Amino acid sequence: MMNGTTRRGLSLAAAAGAAAVAGSYLVTGWSRSFVVRPVDQAIVNLTPGPIVTVVIETVGDAGHLLHVALAIAVVAGLFGSLSLIGGWITGRTDRPFLGVAAASGGSWLLAAGLTGAPAPAVGVALPVAAVTALGGRPSTSDGKQSVDAVRRRVLRAASGSIAFVVAAVIGRQAVDGDIGSRDDEPEPLPDAPRSEGVEARLGELDAASLALDSDELLGMVSPIGEFYNVDIAGFDPEVTAAEWSLTVTGETGSDLTVTFDDLIDRPVEHRAISLRCVGERLNGRKLDTAVWTGTPIRPLIESVDPAGDCDCAMVRGEDGYYVQFPVDVLAEGFLAWGMNGKALPTGHGHPVRVLIPGHWGETNVKWLSEIELLNVEEDGYWEERGWEGTGEVKAVAKLWDEGITERSDGRIELAGHAYAGTRGVGRVEVSTDGGGTWTDATLSDPLPDADVWRQWRHVFDPDGTHEVVVRAVDGEGTRQIREASDPSPSGASGWVRRTVGR
Ligand SMILES: Nc1nc2c(c(=O)[nH]1)N[C@H]1C(S)=C(S)[C@@H](COP(=O)(O)O)O[C@H]1N2
Ligand SMILES: [Mo]
């Protein structure tokens, strides 16, 4: 059992730790200088691959909550301990000032050291000072005080801390919107006149789409706010276009540095490209499409005379992410600074990301910083953790909830999206009898873009319950893999199967 003194000490530490995290959040919001970020980053980097895979496959996106919650607990523990040390100094010296100074000074140093941002670290030091002062022993004439008096002080410190945490969270949210929210309003595309074609492209996709009964199903283009996100870190890098540059280094004839202005001066294209994450479940939602504005990578790569023995490259992002795949594949890619007619939003890699046609999502490095041409192959971030996600995407036909609608005439409309990378979607086959018989679904009009999904639709007369199965056939006539497999290591396979009707 804990005795009263230990319990009071832990309560004070928890109060100081919580106040420290809240104070930092109040000052910085969910940004790079938030004191939780570096610890979260360290947790993400240190968590062994098998654990990451289990978390992704069981709780999915909630995995972010897990590591961020753990990071918050660790940070609170660190600053709580500093407050305890301050309290101990107060007790030993009987000089509250010394204890408070030690706790807050130490907190400021630690926060500034962790984040590299000295000014916002004050947001940590002040609440720690306050809780340490509130909870610390006052000197009394006889050097003693009643247990009741101590208890009252602890209670005061704890309730003060709780009030502060609530006020900080509410105050900051009033400014920023929800915790963890990233993109406010997307910025306009840079260099707008040369980007004119983008509206026409968006219109073309719209025109190709199917008229559906379901009004909730995504169209041909995923709106920016609905486009899925996969990030190794809980915090996005903040890189301005002015700060940004790309270096092409390693086994080259001559290295190259490209600034943002250099980049957008190059030939501009607006490409419709779908992205699919290797970690998503078979009928998951990590499949989306946008019209991206950017420039082809090939001329940049050719200009450095790639000379490595493996004909492979490591591509790196500002968040510490890295992925390795063949230079040939990279050269087919695209460097994008625009998404659906807006500047690339923070969450999708602002200011510049890679888009590799037909390959799994993980090859599309966000917050691009470096392309290093290698001599020997090395594992990328996910491959180090057991994934095999740098190759071509598997074909899939989706049937999401909102794609199933009962029409007023009693018939059922089934609709969804199908994607088969650069092979294109040739056909989508639908069965309403568990796979006994198959019908070709109606498809959205084909687009000139090589790497974009198609919508499909099939309407039928229900008769009781139906076991619906859907499968895509790619442009080369190859059918979606029938055998079911988990997402790990190389992407989910199988056919989406759902029970529909009454
Ligand atoms: N720098 C960086 N790039 C990254 C990632 C990342 O965590 N960091 N995640 C990758 C993965 S696994 C996928 S599926 C796609 C997701 O891109 P999106 O978040 O824009 O949908 O980005 C890829 N590029
Ligand atoms: Mo991914």
Image (cartoon, helix red, strand yellow):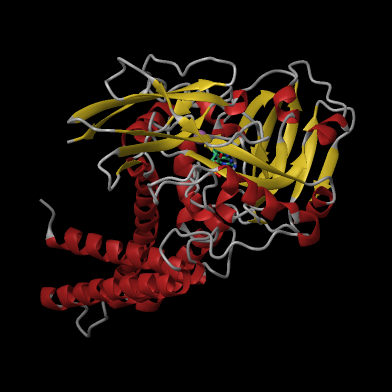
Toward the bottom, the furthest residue is: 141
Q: How many marks?
A: 0
**Near-viewer residue (245 or 154):** 245
* Horizontal side of residue 355 vs 478, given as left or right: right
Residue drawn at (30%, 27%), measured in percent from left and top?
Answer: 468
Figure quadrant of residue 285? top left
Vertically, is 111 above or below 410?
below
Question: Which is nearer the eye, 348 or 252?
Answer: 348
Residue farthest along the front direction in this orientation: 409
Q: Is residue 280 above or below residue 205?
A: above
Q: Is residue 102 visible?
A: no
In the foreground, 56 or 319: 56
For image coordinates 42% across by 74% down, the residue present is: 174
Picture coordinates of residue 1 (x, y %)? 10, 50
57 vs 369, nearest the viewer: 57
The percent coordinates of residue 258 (x first, y second) are 82, 46
Q: Residue sitting at 35 percent across and 55 percent down?
A: 77
Going by the image, does 500 lie left or right of 130? Answer: left
Compared to 304, does 408 lie above or below? below
Residue at the spot x=54%, y=21% of the render? 474
The quarter of the image holding the C terminus is top left
Q: Is residue 240 left or right of residue 309?
A: left
Residue 486 visible in the snapshot:
yes
Q: Position of residue 260 (x, y in %)?
A: 78, 52
Where does the image place residue 35, in percent across and percent down from the top left? Answer: 48, 59
